[in-house]
Amino acid sequence: MMKPGEVLSKLNELVYSILLVGYKKCKENEHYSWEQSFHSLWFITKGKGELYIDGTSYPAEAGKIFFLKPNMNCERVSDTDDSLEYYFVRFTYASAYLYKEQWTFASEIESEFPLLGMYNLQNPPQVMNLLEQIYELKKHRGSIVMMKKKLLFTELLLTIIQDFKAQKITGDTTNSIDSTVDFLSSHYQEKITLNYLSQLAGMSESHYSRLFKKIIGYSPMDYLRHVRMDRAKELIVLSDFRLKAIAQSVGYHDEFYFSRTFKKVVGVSPTEFAKRHRTKRKLPEKN
């Protein structure tokens, strides 16, 4: 499995449409085989059994969650005395995201879904609550209901990834990383080093860097660059500051280095970004 941060980055590139939501109560000792036709999420709420996916057996019991994809050969076996019950969501998706000022699109066939197979959850009630809300919406129709379903499904996926993160890294370690993220958001304009951040977190540089990337999805210094460039984009569009002043306000004393970094992160130069996003304005001349 990808690291939670990598999975979240991939999920963040996708848009979803829910095809069908249901709640299945199996019969005791029920055997059922099929070839999967849709991307599906299963969340086991009660009972015991087994789910065979392409010949591999997985325990199906309360709290387990499964992600299935088309063309999988599956078999569901419910326990003799404790039959299975589960929510299921059939969904489709496409890849559509903005990267460096360019939209990228890909169909479901061209973009692999990053979750597959069986996963354990540390906090199943949160997931169950969201599935219950999605299930209740099946009784209603309309554009507002469709949007609610999409939002709840996105929240469901986010909750699952947060659960995975909590399983890998818990307690004070997570809090230490979160505190440095808060620090970067408030002090991005200052001179900040990896050594200083690791000291704030009370870890070695290498350990801090690994954990930061596992939790956040970026390295610490790459995250800082993105925070600075996000603020710079706001200033370019919403202010009349000169480029040199904008560079200094986000922590760069060399405006040419700032411009190179901006283009690397955003995909276009500050001047080109201003042309695209300002309304009847021009970027002030450099000093």
Image: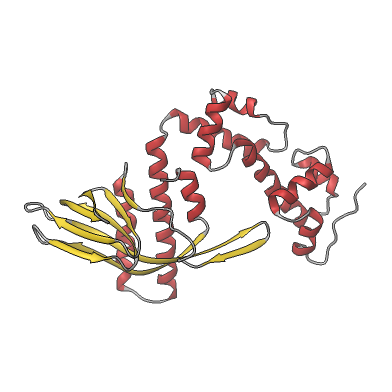
Q: Is residue 269 left or right of residue 58?
A: right
User: Residue at the right extreme?
Assistant: 287
Q: Say if 268 sits above or below 212 in the image.
A: below
Residue that appears at 53% across and 41% down: 216
The quadrant of the picture occupied by the N terminus is top left
User: Residue at the left extreme?
Assistant: 81
Chosen colour scheme: secondary structure
Q: Is residue 224 left or right of residue 162?
A: right
Residue that appears at 40% across and 76% down: 142
Q: Quadrant of residue 165?
A: top left
Q: Who is closer to the viewer here, 5 or 107?
A: 107
Q: Say if 110 sits above or below 119 in the image.
A: below
Q: Who is closer to the viewer here, 282 or 32?
A: 32
Q: Quadrant of residue 272?
A: bottom right
Q: Who is closer to the viewer here, 34 or 163?
A: 34
Q: Is residue 112 left or right of residue 186?
A: left
Residue that appears at 82% across and 56% down: 271
Residue that appears at 38% across and 44% down: 163
The percent coordinates of residue 128 (x first, y second) are 29, 53
